[in-house]
Image (cartoon, rainbow, N blue to C red):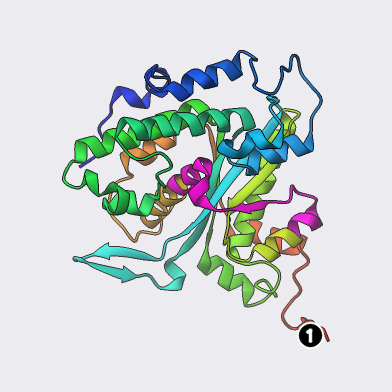
Amino acid sequence: MSLRKSPQLTPKRSRELAFRPRCQRLKELSNFRKGDYPLGKVYGNAPYSALRHFVRSVVPLSKRASCLLAVFMDQEFTAYFDESETQSVFKAGAVKTLPRENRAVIIAGFLATAEQWERLEENWECIFEQYAFPRGTFFHMVEFAQSVGAFEVFRGNTEERQRFLSQLIGLLQVRVRRSIARALRLKDYDDLDAGLALREKASPYTFCALAAIEQATKWAKGYGGELKVVFEYGFPDAGQLLELCRHDKFPIPSFEPKEKWRALQAADMVAWESQKMWKKVLKQEARPVRESMKAIRRIRNDWADYTPENLLASAQHLGCEPRSTFREPCPRG
C-alpha cells in the first residue's frame, strides 16, 4: 500500500503538528527563541565560536546546560550522515543476497543550522509522545519498516504507521536546509581498482563520504558559515576518512552513537530510503519509488552518484598509483 498523501507532508501542517501547545518542552523552547536563555542573554550576531559549535553538534541537548554555552547563531551548520548498501533483496518469499557487481554503497544525510537541529530534536520527541512512545525511543528505519522492536505497535495498522512517518518527514521538510547523498556502484569501483591501487587509499564508503563532505562544505561556505560533520560511531574505514579529510583540509568529522542523536536517526531514514531507490536503479527491484522517498525528495537536495569518469578523477586527485608500480608500505617496527 502506498503512503497516503496527507496534509502532514506540507510544511505548514508540519509546523502545526510540531508545535502542539500540549508539549510543555516546546513552550520552554519558545523562551530560547525569544532570547530568554537560562545562562544569560545574547543579542545580535555574536562572533563565531568553534567551541560552541562543537558542543552544539556533539553534546546531547539534555546535557548541554553543564557546558555553560547557550548562544544561538545561524552561521553554524552541521551535517549528519549515515551509510547504507544494497546488499540483498526480497524475492519469491525469501531474502536473496546480491552479488557484489550488483551492489552500491550510499552516504546520505541532512544539513541544517545548529539551532534548527536543536529544535528538530524537541519536535521529534513531541511526535513520538503523540504516539505514546517513551521519551528517547531509538528510531531505526530497518525496525520501523518491518514493524518490529519498539515499532511492533504499528503491525497491522498501516494507516497509523504511515501517518507517523509522514509527520517525521514533514518535520524534516521544515527544519533541514538541504539533503546531501552520494552513491558508488561497486562494479565501477572494482573495475578501476584492478588497474589503480584504489582500495589501499580509499574504500567505496570513504569515496562517498569525502564527496558528501566536500559538497556540504561548499554549501556552508556559500552562506558564509562554518561546518561540523557527524557520522555514526562505527563508520567503516573511519581512519581513512580522517586522514583524507586532513589532506584535503575538509572539516574533521566526529563519530557519535546513533541512539543519542535524532539527527543521525534522520540520516538513517534517508540512507535507508536511498538504498531502496538504488535497488530499483540497479534493476534489482521492480517496485515503484516509495511515497515516503518522494516526500523526502521535496526537500532541497544534492544527490549524485559517481560515474567511472569522475571516480577516476577522484582517484588521481588522491594520488592512487598504477598497480604495476605500486608497492605496499613497509610495516612499522
Please say whether residue 268 is one of the residues in the magenta stretch.
yes
At a point 48% along the width and 18% down the height, the residue shown is: 27
Q: Position of residue 315 (x, y in %)?
A: 71, 64
Q: Position of residue 212 (x, y in %)?
A: 62, 48
Q: Is residue 206 left or right of residue 294?
A: right
Q: Judge the density around disc 1: few (<14), some (14-19), many (≥20) Cα neighbours within 10 Å.
A: few
Eyeballing the image, is 11 above or below 306? above
Please say whether residue 180 is one of the residues in the magenta stretch.
no
At a point 42% along the width and 67% down the height, the residue shown is: 102
Q: Secondary structure at mark 1?
A: loop
The residue lying toward the viewer, choosing from 239 and 305, is 239
Q: Quadrant of the N terminus?
A: top left
Q: Is residue 183 visible?
A: yes
Residue for badge 1:
331
Q: Quadrant of the C terminus?
A: bottom right
Q: Is residue 295 left or right of residue 25?
A: left
Q: Is residue 303 visible?
A: no
Query: Which residue range is magenta in the image?
Result: 244-269
At a point 58% along the width and 67% down the height, the residue shown is: 189
Eyeballing the image, is 57 above or below 38? below
Residue type at mark 1 is Pro
